[in-house]
Image: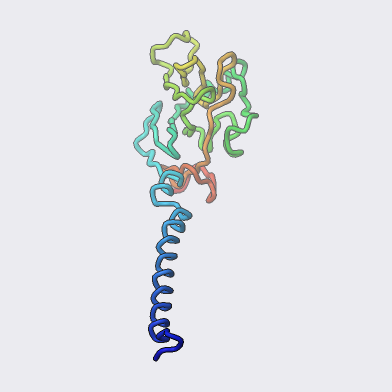
Amino acid sequence: MQDGGIDKKRRHFLTAAATVVGGAGVIATAIPFVSTLSPSAKTKAVGGPIEVDISGLKLGERMVEKWRGKPVWILRRSEESLADLSGMTDILRDPESEVEQQPEYAKNEYRSVNPEYLVVIGLCTHLGCSPNYLARNEANDFGADWKGGFFCPCHGSKFDLAGRVYKGVPAPDNLVVPKYQFISKSKILIGDDSVGNGTGASS
């Protein structure tokens, strides 16, 4: 049926077809945009909390885990090491952890939830190098008074076994303690303390 030289059926068909094609184009364009708004599984894995099994960690040993692209140290301290911490106040820049480098529950002499375990981000607070762990009995150039701790070879900063920075070194602050919690006697959740921050007394 012609109307002014135009076939109405043909016009309706072309209009409908153009609408369908245009709508499909909009959807195809929108999908990549929307997908950028939702974090990928890899992104979630990098930024999310991690669960760490510490059951095999012996006294004096340190393990290193990666969280948010940073090394996280977990050190199991002996009774002797813990006793040494109280006698180091005079040689430390911030012995009472006044600078906010840790959650409130780790603002204590041990800078931890459970005194036996230290959990810190293993990056020097000077320029972000990763210090070495030197136990009390390891060879060092610090003299017989060295109680064990961390030494940054980049510029010479030193930290004790609670991650507290020594006086007179380039690093301005103590090592950072991330949010964490014990979810059992042998497992730590790093990056999340929403459930609680007990010592893992229950299994």
* Residue drawn at the location 49% of the way across and 14% of the way down: 156
Q: Is residue 82 in view from this perspective?
A: no
Pick whichever, 97 or 32, lies toward us: 32
Q: Is residue 84 in view from this perspective?
A: yes
* Residue drawn at the location 39% of the way across and 48% of the way down: 42
* Residue drawn at the location 52% of the way across and 26% of the way down: 163
Pick whichever, 173 or 74, lies toward us: 173
* Residue drawn at the location 50% of the way across and 11% of the way down: 145
What percent of the width, then of the height, locates residue 181?
Answer: 50, 43
> Considering the image in quadrants, where does the N terminus appear?
bottom left
Pick whichever, 183 or 26, lies toward us: 26
Tell me the quarter of the picture where residue 101 sits: top right
Q: In the rendered view, tell whether residue 62 sits above or below residue 179.
A: above
Coloring applied to the structure: rainbow
What percent of the width, then of the height, locates residue 202?
Answer: 46, 48
Q: In the rendered view, tell whether residue 152 sits above or below residue 196.
A: above
Q: Is residue 107 rendered to the left or right of residue 115? A: right
Q: In the rendered view, tell whether residue 77 sits above or below residue 195.
A: above
Q: Which residue in the rendered view is the most extreme toward the left?
A: 56
